[in-house]
Each structure stands twice: as C-alpha cells, then as structure tokens.
C-alpha cells in the first residue's frame, strides 16, 4: 500500500515556540497528491491528513486542504474569535437538542465531495445526513454539512472567505453564514440564490434549513468586538 511520506522532528514542548502567522499561508502539495493518486483511497488520505493535523496541534495554527492541492496553514483565532465560535456552537447545540441533527466542533475535519478538507467554524448535520453516515461518525465527516458558518478573524481577508463559502455551496450546503464582526455584517448564502448581505442585523434566521433557529448575532458576536472598534 502506498503511503504519503512526511518528515517529522522531535521538539521539546517546553522549549518549542508557536509558529506565528500574520494570515493564512498556502503551500502547493498537488505533486505529492498526484503521486499517490489511485494508490490511496479517500479514507486513507483522510487518515494521513488527520494524523498530520493532530501532530501539529498546539503550534498556533490549524490545517486545511483544498481540492486543488493547496495545504492552507491558518492562524488560530484570538480570544474574541474563540468566544464567538463558542457562542455560535453553543446556540446550535441547544437548538439541535430539541430539533435534531448534530452540531460539530470547530475542529471537526469535513471532507467535501470535491476532496477539500476543511474545519468550519460552525456546522450542523441534518438528521438525514447523520443516518447516511451511520451510527458511528468517522474521524472525518464525509458529507458537506447542511449548514456551515465562518466567522471572520483579524488575520482573515474577505475574498478568500467568500470563495470558501462558495465552495461549501457548490458541494451541497443548503445554508451558509459568513459573519464579519468588524463591519457588523452577515453574508447569507443559499443554493442558486444571490448572496444576501445583512448590515448590523440583530439576529439571523436559519429558516427553512434549520426551522426555528434564530441566532442573536449582534448580542453574541458583534458586542464582543465593540471595545476594539472604539
């Protein structure tokens, strides 16, 4: 069986410094992926990628892999970003307990149908998608969640995030939110519909994909960044 070779170096955690990034950095590893094309299954590539990502936990960044062979090295979010993710995930968890489906962690690795491996900030699987995956969820979720959301961080630029949202929709997402807390703006994505831009909304509705889910974005996310804007 073919394997993807990687070189690792043992580092003393007590002396290791985090790898600091001003913004996302991409590395083209398409030649490596092409060299194992047809030799490794998608599940085997998932196993390699999960192991690679886990081996680099705690170093100040997380990894994603696009269908085009770009390994994206993303800086970890700051305190506000972490709280914003927790607010969104917490609200989804509470709603899904009553209405069904499954809210994923922001560190869950999702493999999209086109081969992209991503870690959405917010994501929810419908009951139908859970049934498709079976009783035991794999380490990599192999369907595009019905709902996905991204929260812009201080190191993000808008165009790459917009392209990421478009990729979600092209791969089967039914609803997507791109939340920009700095401009107090939410971009709402739906299949085959123009992106709706909400200016400083008090809340955002998940209808009809997540019927009855209303997220109080102004209070739960925008308010976190008010002191930074002053």
Image: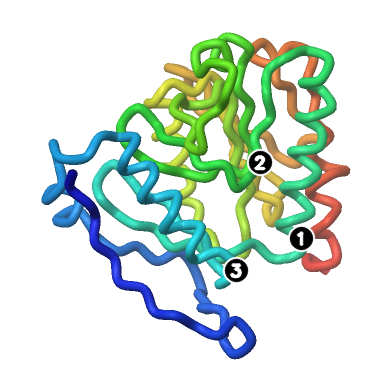
Of residues 209 and 93, the one drawn nearer to the viewer in this rendering: 93
Query: Is 139 on the left-hand or right-hand side of 27?
Result: right
Of residues 133 and 186, the one drawn nearer to the viewer in this rendering: 133
Q: Position of residue 59 (x, y in %)?
A: 55, 72
Query: Is 145 on the left-hand or right-hand side of 229?
Result: left
Of residues 154 and 35, the one drawn nearer to the viewer in this rendering: 35
In the displayed orientation, state which residue is furthest to the front.
1
Q: Residue at x 56, y 64 (%)?
A: 57
| On screen, residue 117 above or below 27 | above
| On screen, residue 128 above or below 217 | above
Kindly state the secondary structure of the residue where label 2 is placed.
Answer: loop
Q: Is residue 196 visible?
A: no
Residue 105 numbered mark, or none: 2
Check the picture and name the quadrant holding the C terminus: bottom right
Residue designated by label 3:
58
Alpha carbon of mark 2 to alpha carbon of mark 3: how far?
17 Å
Q: Nearer the viewer, mark 2 or mark 1?
A: 2
Residue designated by label 1:
80
CA neighbours of label 3 inside 10 A, class few (<14), some (14 to 19), many (20+): few
Q: Residue at x 41, y 35 (%)?
A: 111
Query: Is 183 on the left-hand or right-hand side of 43?
Result: right
Query: Is 220 on the left-hand or right-hand side of 114?
Result: right
């Amino acid at each position: 069986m073919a394997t993807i070779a990687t070189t690792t170096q043992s580092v003393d955690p007590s002396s290791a410094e985090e790898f600091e990034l001003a913004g996302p950095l991409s590395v083209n590893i398409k030649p490596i992926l092409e060299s194992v094309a047809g030799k490794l299954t998608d599940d085997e590539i998932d196993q390699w990628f999960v192991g690679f990502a886990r081996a680099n936990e705690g170093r100040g960044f997380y990894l994603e892999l696009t269908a085009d062979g770009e390994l994206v090295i993303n800086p970890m979010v700051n305190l506000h970003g972490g709280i914003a993710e927790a607010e969104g995930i917490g609200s989804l968890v509470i709603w899904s307990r009553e209405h069904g489906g499954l809210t994923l962690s922001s560190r869950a690795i999702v493999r999209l149908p086109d081969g992209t491996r991503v870690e959405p900030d917010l994501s929810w699987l419908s009951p139908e998608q859970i049934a498709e995956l079976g009783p035991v969820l794999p380490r990599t979720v192999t369907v595009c969640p019905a709902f996905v959301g991204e929260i812009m961080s201080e190191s993000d630029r808008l165009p790459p995030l917009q392209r990421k949202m478009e990729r979600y929709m092209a791969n089967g997402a039914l609803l997507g939110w791109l939340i920009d807390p700095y401009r107090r703006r939410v971009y709402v994505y739906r299949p085959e519909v123009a992106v709706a831009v909400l200016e400083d909304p008090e809340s955002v509705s998940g209808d009809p994909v997540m019927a009855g889910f209303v997220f109080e974005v102004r209070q739960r996310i925008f308010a976190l960044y008010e002191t930074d804007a002053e």
